[in-house]
Image (tube, rainbow, N blue to C red):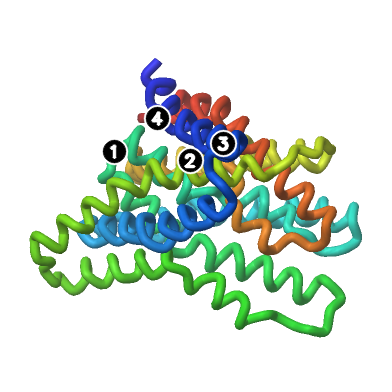
Amino acid sequence: MTVLSALIPIFGLILVGWFLAARGVVSADGSKALSAITFKLFMPVLLFSGLAKADLAEALSPLLLLLYYIPALLVFLCINLIAHRRLGRPSSMGLAASYSNNVLVGVPLVSVILGVDSLVYLFAILAFHSLILFTLQSLYNAFCGGSDRGLDWRGLLASLANPLIIGLALGALVNLSGLPMPSPLWRIVELLSAAALPMALLMLGISLSGYRLHLSGSLILLTLGKLMLFPALVLAAGLLFTSLNPTAHAVLVLMAACPTGVNVLAFSMGDGDVRIISSVIFLSTLLAALTLPIWLLLLPL
């Protein structure tokens, strides 16, 4: 019952966002403006505030990163191997099964269930999330696609130089430097941070209203890989290392169990991939409301 009480507000706000967009209460222009202020102001400030005062010693443990990214890479490689053999070309299928929506869903989820102090573990993973998985996808496209264009480093760097990464970097800089922030300035940061989580969930619901579900075998495979296989591997990996902080382990499993992130669409190759990936984003977000309680019950908290 405690798990459901924590999850209902999260998915309730997503549903409210979907309803507002589906009923036309929020127009396309309004949605664009809300998205800009959420992802260019509210969320970066939240990431900044969380990292600026966090204890980075344990969060930046190599073990923490390995226990998340080794399972992520295994899922990425296995799904891509299956998809490549079937399609005969690169696709973003592996990325869809290994790239979690750790900003829109992960941050609110960890905050509500494990507490704001636990976000430091999420931030540590998030700092390398796009860098590692987007680089792998770009390398895969460049060297396995039969194209002579090579790796698009400029496009990759542009995708990483976003306000969310900048917010994390500035928060880490303030933390490591020990620079004090004036109380009035920090109060502004707190007020902006308070708006981030509800706005992020509303925006996820608004974005989902534009997706359509196209049922296929690939959709089922990718959704199961994302919501079941990936978190199962992270859970098993953490159980092998008893020295890992139980709270940190729980954060890793919840991050792996989050639905597919919307940024994967940027790597879709052709209309066929767009249909499948958009369907995975939509279906994995819906089904996460059912699978996340299962993982929460299995966690050794």
* C-alpha distance separating marks 3 and 1: 26 Å
Residue 107 placement (x, y as % from top left): 40, 46
Where does residue 299 sit, x and y in percent of width and height?
Answer: 43, 30
Residue under label 1, please give it: 115
Q: Going from the N terminus, do you reach mark 1 or mark 4 first?
A: 1
Q: Nearer the viewer, residue 272 or 202?
A: 202
Identify the residue at horizontal 64%, vertical 57% (top origin).
Answer: 264
Toward which corner of the image does residue 218 lie, by quadrant? top right
Numbered tag placed on residue 300 in the rendering: 4
Label 2: which residue? 253
Image quarter hosting the C terminus: top left
Q: Secondary structure at mark 4?
A: loop
Mark 4 and mark 3: span between their CA atoms?
34 Å
Disc number at residue 74?
none
Q: From the image, tell me which residue sits under label 3.
A: 18
> Does the CB distance between marks 4 and 2 fall below 8 Å?
no
In the structure shown, which secondary structural element does the residue marked by tag 2 occupy? helix
Image quadrant where one finds the N terminus:
top left
**Three-letter amino acid code at disc 3?**
Trp
Cα–Cα gap, marks 1 and 2: 15 Å
Which residue corresponds to the image point at 75% horizontal and 83% vertical from the top-left? 150
Which secondary structure, mark 3?
helix
Identity, as a three-letter code, of the amino acid under mark 1:
Gly
Q: Are marks 1 and 4 in contact (CB under 8 Å)?
A: no
Neighbourhood count class around disc 3 (C-alpha, 10 Å): few under 14, some 14–19, many 20 upward: many
Query: Residue placed at 47% from the left, 28% from the top?
Result: 12
Kindly identify the amino acid type of the residue bearing the numbered disc 2.
Answer: Val
Does 81 sit left or right of 86 as displayed? left
Give x and y (percent) for residue 131. Answer: 53, 68
